[in-house]
Image (cartoon, grey):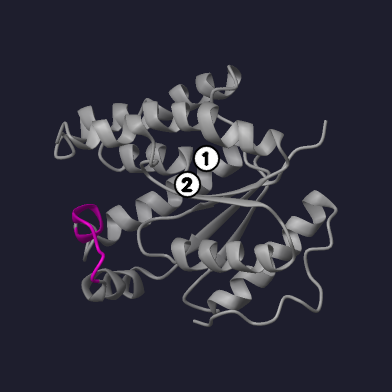
Amino acid sequence: MKKGVFVVFESAPKCGKTAAATQLEERMEVVGERVLHKRGALSVSEFAENYKGLKVDDDIGYSTAFYWADTVFDTGDCIAPALAQEVTVIQERYDLSVVAYREIHGYEGDFFLLKEYRKRRMIIDPDLTVFLTAAPETVFERIKQGADSSVVDLAFVNETKKFQGMQDSIRQHLEDLGRNYITIETDMISVEETVDIVMNEMVKIGGKNLIDDTTASIGGI
C-alpha cells in the first residue's frame, strides 16, 4: 500500500526547524505535492488546547505526560490518516524531543516508554529524520534576540551542558532506533541549502521527482 512520506525535524531549541520546515513545505507545494505541516511540541488538537488551560508547564515531571499523550493522539488522529492518503507530513519535533528534554532534566525512563509506543504502532517511525545542530553560542544569541523565544527556550541560554546534552540524546537515540536520518549544521549553511539536502533525501525515499525547474529559490537564510 502506498503512503505519504513522513519527515521529522528534531533538534534542541532554535536550530532552525521552523525555517527549514516552512521552506520545505513551500517548495513541495510548488511541485504539486500535498503537504501537512505540523509544529510541535503540542499539536493544535482539542486535547492540546484543553491541556494548555491546565497551566502545569512549570512542572516538568507532570506536564510531559500530557506531551506524550498529545504525541500519541495526534499520531493516530492526524499523522497516520494523512500518510494513508499519500499526503507528505512535515513534523517539527516528534517523539525524540520529548525523550531528550526529559533526559536532560533527570527523567531516564522515557526511551523505554517510546519503545513500547512504537511496538504498539502508537508512534510511527519517520521515513526521514532531519537532525539539526548548531553551536551553543549561536543558539544562545538566537534565543536572546528572538521575539518568539519561549520560557523553555530562554532556560537554555548559557546552559551549554544542557543544550549539548539534548543534542547528544537525540543523536544517540536515532542510532539506538536505527532510524533513517541526516545531520545538518544550520550555522554552517543556509536554509535553502538545508532544504536542498532534505529534498534530495526525500527523492531517494519516495521515488518521486520533487526537484525540477519549478523549484526556484524561495527565501534565503
In the image, the segment drawn in magenta is 147-154
Q: Which mark is residue 35?
A: none
Name which residue type carries label 1.
Answer: His
Whether 153 is among the magenta residues is yes
Residue 136: percent from left, percent from top: 34, 68
Residue 124 in which image quadrant = top right
Give the labeled residue for mark 1: 173
Q: Up-down: is 120 above or below 216?
A: above
Q: Is residue 6 above or below residue 75?
A: below
Q: How dense is the environment of label 1, judged by Cα within 10 Å: few (below 14), some, or many (20 and up)?
A: some
Label 1 close to label 2 by CB (< 8 Å): yes
Can residue 47 be found in the magenta stretch?
Answer: no
Q: Secondary structure at mark 1?
A: helix
Q: Residue at image x 40%, y 41%?
A: 43
Q: Position of residue 138 (x, y in %)?
A: 35, 75
Residue at x 63% of width, y 41% of height: 126
Residue 49, how many percent across, how many down? 28, 36
* Amino acid type at image mark 2: Ile
Q: Which residue is mark 2?
A: 170
- Distance, label 1 to label 2, CA atoms, is 5 Å
Q: Quadrant of the N terminus?
A: top right
Quarter of the image where one finds residue 60: top left
Q: Nearer the viewer, residue 104 or 187?
A: 187
Is disc 2 placed on a helix, strand or loop?
helix
Q: Residue at x 52, y 40 (%)?
A: 173
